[in-house]
Image: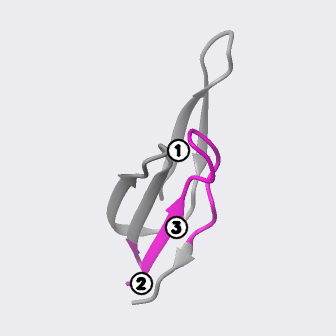
Amino acid sequence: MLVDVGMRGMNGIELEVVSLGGGITELAVGSNQDGRLEVFAIGTDHALNHLWQTAPNGGWSTWESLGG
């Protein structure tokens, strides 16, 4: 399971833990020029999966299978 832990709020620290789902055996994370993170993972189904932030410091897409 991949977990997103972020700081939210302007007047203090509020931690939010959000499960991004999926069983993962291997993981790689990269950053785009605009600051969005992209995650590539080999799942327990042995397929390559892709997940990305929809905006810098923003929410996440759903997993997209790239096959495998």
The front one of 9 and 19 is 9
Q: Position of residue 64 (x, y in %)?
A: 56, 75
Identity, as a three-letter code, of the amino acid under mark 3: Gly
* Residue 28 position by quadrant: bottom left
> Magenta stretch: residue 13 in it?
no
Identify the main secondary structure in magenta.
Answer: loop
In the image, residue 54 sits, relative to residue 21, either above or below, namely above
Residue type indicated by callout 1: Asp
SS state under label 1? strand
Counting every numbered tag in the picture gives 3
For mark 3, give the secondary structure: loop
Magenta segment: does it hold 58? yes
The residue carrying pointer 2 sits among few (fewer than 14), some (14 to 19) or many (20 or more) residues within 10 Å by Cα, namely some
> What element does badge 2 sit on?
loop
Residue 59 location, x and y as percent? 64, 48
Distance from label 2 to label 1 (Cα)?
22 Å
- Residue drawn at x 57%, y 56% as measured from the top left: 20
Residue 22's disc number: 3
31 sits to left or right of 14? left
User: Which region shows up in magenta?
Assistant: 42-63
Choose mark 3 or mark 1, whichever is in front: 1
* Label 3 Cα neighbours within 10 Å, binned few <14 / some 14-19 / many ≥20: some
Identify the residue position indicated by label 2 in the image.
47
Residue, disc 1: 4
Q: Nearer the viewer, residue 27 or 31?
A: 31
| Colour basis | one colour
In screen coordinates, is 50 left or right of 14? left
Separation of residues labelled 3 and 1 (CA atoms): 13 Å
Estimate the spatial distance between the alpha carbons at disc 2 and disc 3, rounded to whole Å.
11 Å
Instruction: Please tell me which of labels 2 and 1 falls first in the chain.
Output: 1
User: Which quadrant would residue 11 be assigned to in this image?
Assistant: top right
